[in-house]
Amino acid sequence: MASRFQQLWALGVTSVTTDEPIVYQEIDNPVLLISEKTYVSVWVASYLLAIAVVLLIKRYFMKKKSKELTPKTS
């Protein structure tokens, strides 16, 4: 819930309505304040990393499957 508050704060919202005011009561400022350029860079890097991980996992299973399908010669 506090992370949502940080997102709203970064957007410049001046007030927040919530059913859990105790969560926000002790927060004076965002925990992490970064520039828009840094924010976008982090998201792009994490997106590219996720794509690389998915492709590596796919390659691993395709190699494993091709080894299983290859007939063994004796």
Image (tube, rainbow, N blue to C red):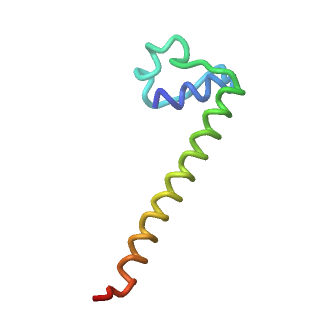
Residue in the foreground of this view, choosing between 36 and 67: 67
Classify residue 38 as left or right of residue 29. right
Q: Position of residue 69 (x, y in %)?
A: 39, 83
Q: Position of residue 7 (x, y in %)?
A: 59, 29
Classify residue 49 as left or right of residue 2. right
Above or below for 72 versus 1: below
Residue 67 placement: quadrant:
bottom left
- Residue at image position (55%, 52%) is 52
Residue in the foreground of this view, choosing between 70 and 7: 70
Q: Residue furthest top?
A: 28
Above or below for 60 versus 5: below
Residue 37 placement: quadrant:
top right
Residue in the foreground of this view, choosing between 37 and 3: 37
Q: Residue furthest left?
A: 74
- Residue at image position (70%, 26%) is 36
- Residue at image position (43%, 28%) is 20
Classify residue 44 as left or right of residue 64. right
Quadrant in which the C terminus appears: bottom left
Q: Position of residue 73 (x, y in %)?
A: 32, 88
Q: Position of residue 32 (x, y in %)?
A: 54, 19
Residue 39 placement: quadrant:
top right
